[in-house]
């Protein structure tokens, strides 16, 4: 997390993530690995689509790590997690004194990613007005900091991602058609976990092995784990699978029992409970509100705009609530 606290992440990691880490043996995931290898060596802009939790950022990192820019920074930013009033400064930076609270100059992600790759996650959640500004920067590779007079030239490769149906987003005027055409020079679709067959078993074993290595343990799955893994719908995809296994790993003393250790949203045959949270009678009103906000943000994959719509409040109201509870961005994204 960068110092601004709004979801941008810089990474200089090399060799830790590559196409071989996009685990799976299904035809769909093998196709993803194949196109990653092909496009990585080019400078093409890539639009990665797929449901929440399928691993779109992992694909973006794999492209970066296999490209000529691998020695440069990889900077990721969630376009839906930044308040509209701050997104311009987060993208392009600002000069000292350019607005209230700008006590020092700030380099935006286009500058921080210079010489490397900029990953714009949830691009369809970017305010429509800012999409126009972004399109111009993609066309000219030049921009100004907020409050600045000096034109800055950017040297970044752009990768973008969305979990939305892009045609639907365009028809709803939530995504500019010309921006879509500029981003989707090379589209990659990451399939949902439910369409990947036995990959769920391979991934589960890989996650368990990784947790055992980190903890210095030798825990094993107990029960008919393969049937359970294949039977569950995994609406949260790979992210949900990994989180469920980690919870079960923490709770299990010697064995990992998925059926007993998953949270309500991860249990089989409990679709009617998937959208519920449990509150103890006597819970303070402000704490109940806090739990509801956190659960809604989690369900909305950290997207504040979508969470505000679900909660029936404005983005500003939601932001003020988060500030009131002093929630760090790392807790909710």
Image (tube, rainbow, N blue to C red):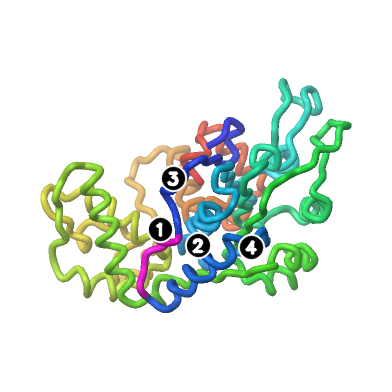
Q: Does the magenta stretch include residue 126?
A: no
Give the image quarter of residue 203: bottom left
The residue sitting at 29% across, 70% down in the picture is: 268
Callout 1–callout 3 Cβ contact below 8 Å: no
* Residue 77, numbered circle: none
Q: Nearer the viewer, mark 3 or mark 2?
A: 2
* Residue 52, numbered circle: 2
The x and y percentages for residue 313 are 63, 50
Crowding around mark 4 (Cα neighbors within 10 Å: few <14, some 14 to 19, many 20+) is many
Tell me the distance, in whole angstroms, between the alpha carbons under discs 1 and 3.
21 Å
Question: Tag 4, which secondary structure?
Answer: strand
Does residue 316 show up?
Answer: no
The residue sitting at 16% across, 61% down in the picture is: 221
Tell me the distance, in whole angstroms, between the alpha carbons under discs 4 and 3.
37 Å
Q: Which of marks 4 and 3 is in front?
A: 4
Q: Which of marks 1 and 3 is in front?
A: 1
Q: In the figure, is residue 87 to the left or right of 98?
A: left
* Residue 239, numbered circle: 1
Magenta region: 19-25
The x and y percentages for residue 194 are 39, 75
Question: Tag 3, which secondary structure?
Answer: helix
Q: Is residue 38 above or below residue 68?
A: below
Q: Which of marks 3 and 2 is nearer the N terminus?
A: 2
Give the image quarter of residue 87: top right
Q: Does the magenta stretch include residue 21?
A: yes
* Residue 291, numbered circle: 3
Q: Nearer the viewer, mark 2 or mark 4?
A: 4
Q: Earlier in the sequence, mark 2 or mark 4?
A: 4
Crowding around mark 3 (Cα neighbors within 10 Å: few <14, some 14 to 19, many 20+) is some
Q: In the figure, is residue 258 to the left or right of 28?
A: left
Does residue 258 show up?
Answer: yes
């Amino acid at each position: 997390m960068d110092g601004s606290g709004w979801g941008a992440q810089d990474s200089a990691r090399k060799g830790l993530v590559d196409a071989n880490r996009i685990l799976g043996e299904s035809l769909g995931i093998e196709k993803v690995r194949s196109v990653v290898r092909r496009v990585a060596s080019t400078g093409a802009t890539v639009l990665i689509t797929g449901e929440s939790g399928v691993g779109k950022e992992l694909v973006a990192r794999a492209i970066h790590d296999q490209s000529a820019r691998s020695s440069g920074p990889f900077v990721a930013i969630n376009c839906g997690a930044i308040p509209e009033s701050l997104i311009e400064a987060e993208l392009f930076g600002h000069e000292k004194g350019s607005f209230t609270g700008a006590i020092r100059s700030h380099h935006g992600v286009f500058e921080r990613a210079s010489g490397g790759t900029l990953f714009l996650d949830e691009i369809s959640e970017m305010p429509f007005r800012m999409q126009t500004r972004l399109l111009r920067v993609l066309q000219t590779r030049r921009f100004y900091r907020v409050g600045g007079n000096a034109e800055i030239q950017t040297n970044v490769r752009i990768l973008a991602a969305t979990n939305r149906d892009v045609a639907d987003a365009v028809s709803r005027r939530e995504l500019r058609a010309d921006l879509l055409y500029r981003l989707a020079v090379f589209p990659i679709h990451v399939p949902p976990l439910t369409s990947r067959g036995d990959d769920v078993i391979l991934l589960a074993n890989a996650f368990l092995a990784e947790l055992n290595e980190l903890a210095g343990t030798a825990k094993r799955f107990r029960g008919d784990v393969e049937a359970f893994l294949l039977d569950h719908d995994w609406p949260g995809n790979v992210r949900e699978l990994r989180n469920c296994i980690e919870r079960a790993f923490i709770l299990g003393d010697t064995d990992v029992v998925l059926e007993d250790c998953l949270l309500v949203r991860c249990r089989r045959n409990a679709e009617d409970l998937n959208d519920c949270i449990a509150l103890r009678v006597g819970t303070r009103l402000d704490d109940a509100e806090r739990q509801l906000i956190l659960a809604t943000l989690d369900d909305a994959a950290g997207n504040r705009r979508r969470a505000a719509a679900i909660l029936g409040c404005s983005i500003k109201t939601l932001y003020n609530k988060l500030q009131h509870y002093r929630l760090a961005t790392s807790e909710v994204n």
